[in-house]
Image (spheres, helix red, strand yellow):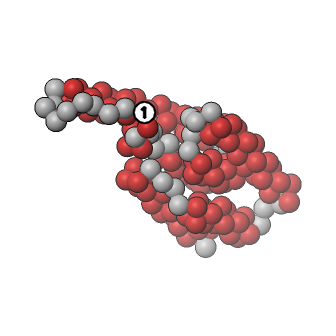
Amino acid sequence: MQYATKFATCLVLASLSLSDLRFRRLPTRAVLLVACLYGVDAAVTGISLSSLAAHAAAATLSFVGFALLFKFGWMGGGDVKLAAAVFLWAGTAYAWPVFFVVSCCGLMLGVTMLAIDRYRNRRTAVSPRGPRHDPRHDPRHAVPYGVALAAGGIAAVWLPLLNPL
């Protein structure tokens, strides 16, 4: 049952990643499912109340941190919720390795999006179709950070089996 829960979580994270790439949206129900699947995994593995509290604390801290990023316009609201669900899985024991995975994937994603935007801008600058629009407010130019969070979520799901503390 534990592996089924972990595989189901990875499938939901992959679907969230695709949704963020295609539509720049992270459906709340899918994010909630990731968090609920942690509850199933915790029940199956029989974790202690102190460990459950540590996982909840990691989720709360990540929610607050990502909410600050949202306040400054650097992160979307769905990313904030997904970060809390991902760090619920990570807990305090795996928070830093998961944060490292999310950061590295986010960096690669950001650089890739900059390259794509530069290529698009170069093509539209010489286009005879008229003046360019301001790309800063175009959702197609937003970084789909849910992809990086999903990669970190997959790491959070499997790290306890690969490296038990």
Q: How many marks?
A: 1
Q: Is residue 54 above or below residue 101?
A: below
> What x and y, as percent, mark residue 113?
37, 34
| Residue 50 in picture, x, y percent from top left | 86, 54
Q: Which residue is outermost to the bottom?
A: 1
Q: Is residue 7 above or below residue 108?
A: below
Q: Is residue 90 left or right of residue 23?
A: right
Kindly identify the residue that appears in the image at 27 percent across and 31 percent down.
132
Q: Residues within 10 Å of mark 1 (few under 14, many from 20)?
A: few
- SS state under label 1: helix
Q: Work out whether residue 74 can be spotted.
A: yes
- Quadrant (top left/top right/bottom left/bottom right) for the N terminus: bottom right
The residue sitting at the front extreme is 130
Extreme residue toward the right, this view: 50
Q: Nearer the viewer, residue 29 or 155?
A: 29
Measured as percent of width and height from the top left, residue 119 is found at 25, 29
The front one of 71 and 82 is 71
Of residue 88 and residue 30, the one placed in the foreground of this image is 30
In x, y percent, where is residue 109?
42, 36
According to the picture, the residue beneath numbered tag 1 turns out to be 136
Q: Residue at x 55, y 70 (%)?
A: 4
Question: Which residue is rendered at x = 32% and y = 33% of the image?
Answer: 133
Left or right, residue 11 beside residue 77: left
**On screen, residue 106 above or below 155:** above
- Which amino acid type is marked by label 1? Arg
Residue in the picture at 66% in, 66% down: 36
Q: Is residue 6 left or right of residue 22?
A: right
- Please state which of residues 67 and 151 is positioned toward the viewer in this rendering: 67
Image quadrant in which you'd find residue 143? top left
- Residue 119 shows up from this direction: no
Residue 112, image quadrant: top left
